[in-house]
Amino acid sequence: MFRGVTTLSLDTKGRLAVPSKYRDALLAHGDGRVVVTADPSQCLLLFPLLEWEPIEKKLNSLSSFNPQTRSLQRLLIGNAVDLELDTAGRILLPAMLREFAALDKSVVMVGQGAKFELWSESRWQAQMDAALTFSDGIMPDELAGFSL
């Protein structure tokens, strides 16, 4: 279970050092093999391989005749890249995915249960600003009755 927000630095080659507190879990859930893909929110998603495989299978089982479904398949599966933690606990993020998510030196890694989101610092800050208010003033149905 991944949670928490960590600010990390990309090196000049595009490598990201995964914090040591997450490395053991990534090694246990796929021998350090991960899948990184694009997300509609313009961040990247990082899954342990074993968490990604059922998602990919489900996406592939959907009809490609629906244009919205096909677009999501193209985005998630088409941009998915298999990566492996190196001996220093780093992953090399492909240039195309770094550009898609506007990742530069400062990257925000956000634990989301079974996966991580990787955000540019500025886009993450915009997400946090938006989370403080519901722009249309309407509470989503899924949150009706939810309490902390």
Image (cartoon, helix red, strand yellow):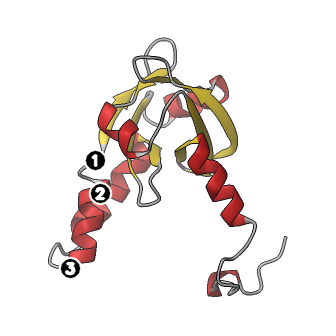
- Determine the residue located farthest toward the left in the rendered image: 65
Residue 125 location in percent, x, y? 66, 50
At 47% from the left edge and 59% from the top edge, which residue is drawn? 41
Q: Is 17 situated left or right of 77 in this image?
A: right
At 47% from the left edge and 49% from the top edge, which residue is drawn? 43
Q: Nearer the viewer, residue 147 or 41?
A: 41
**Mark 3 closeness class: few <14, some 14–19, many ≥20 residues within 10 Å:** few
Q: Quadrant of residue 12?
A: top left
Q: Which mark is residue 66?
A: 3
Q: Earlier in the sequence, mark 1 or mark 3?
A: 3
**Residue behind mark 1:** 79
Q: Mark 2 touching mark 1, by CB under 8 A?
A: yes
Residue 9 location in percent, x, y? 58, 25
- Determine the residue located farthest toward the right in the rendered image: 148
Please tell me whether mark 3 sits on a helix, a strand or a loop: loop
Please tell me whether mark 1 sits on a helix, a strand or a loop: loop
Q: As shown in the figure, which amino acid type bears the numbered disc 1?
A: Asn
**Residue behind mark 2:** 75
Q: Quadrant of residue 21?
A: top right
Vertical relation: 66 (above or below) 8: below
Q: Nearer the viewer, residue 148 or 124?
A: 124
| C-alpha separation, residue under disc 1 versus residue under disc 3 | 19 Å
